[in-house]
Image (cartoon, helix red, strand yellow):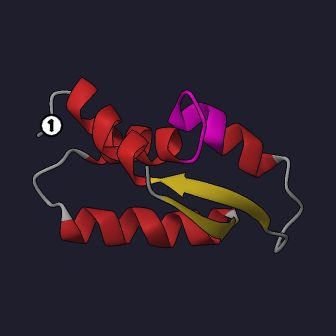
Amino acid sequence: MFLYSLSLNADDLNVARKHLSTKLPEVKRSHLAEALAASLGFNTSIGLNQFLNTIPARETRLHYWNAQAFVQRLAELGTT
């Protein structure tokens, strides 16, 4: 399992989503959002967004990114 630590806030997440969309243009944005949420330990992208809404502006929280969970969630959504 590959885990990477990263600081997370709403701006960073938006940058990550845009970067992933650029690198994986064949994957639906909604699937990328769900896979990104799963890779950060959330059940859904809505759960991740709700968590981010609780963080004060410009504050970051340390999270771990699980590459295996990202790929697994994409597979569950029908993306290979």
The magenta stretch spans which residues? 40-48
Front-most of residues 60 and 5: 5
Kindly indicate the quadrant of the structure image that contains residue 59.
Answer: bottom right
Residue in the image at 18% along x and 61% along y:
24
Front-most of residues 41 and 18: 41
Coordinates of residue 35 in the picture (x, y in percent): 39, 42
Residue sitting farthest toward the right = 56
* Other-residue count near label 1 (Cα within 10 Å), few / some / many at <14 / 14–19 / ≥20: some
Kindly state the secondary structure of the residue where label 1 is placed: loop
Q: Which residue is mark 1?
A: 79
Residue in the image at 37% along x and 45% along y:
68
Kindly indicate the quadrant of the structure image that contains residue 46.
Answer: top right
Query: Three-letter amino acid code at disc 1?
Result: Thr
Coordinates of residue 71 in the picture (x, y in percent): 29, 44
Magenta highlight on residue 47: yes
Magenta highlight on residue 20: no
Residue in the image at 37% along x and 68% along y:
18
Taking the image as shown, residue 62 lies to the left or right of residue 45, namely right
Coordinates of residue 54 in the picture (x, y in percent): 85, 47
Front-most of residues 60 and 28: 60
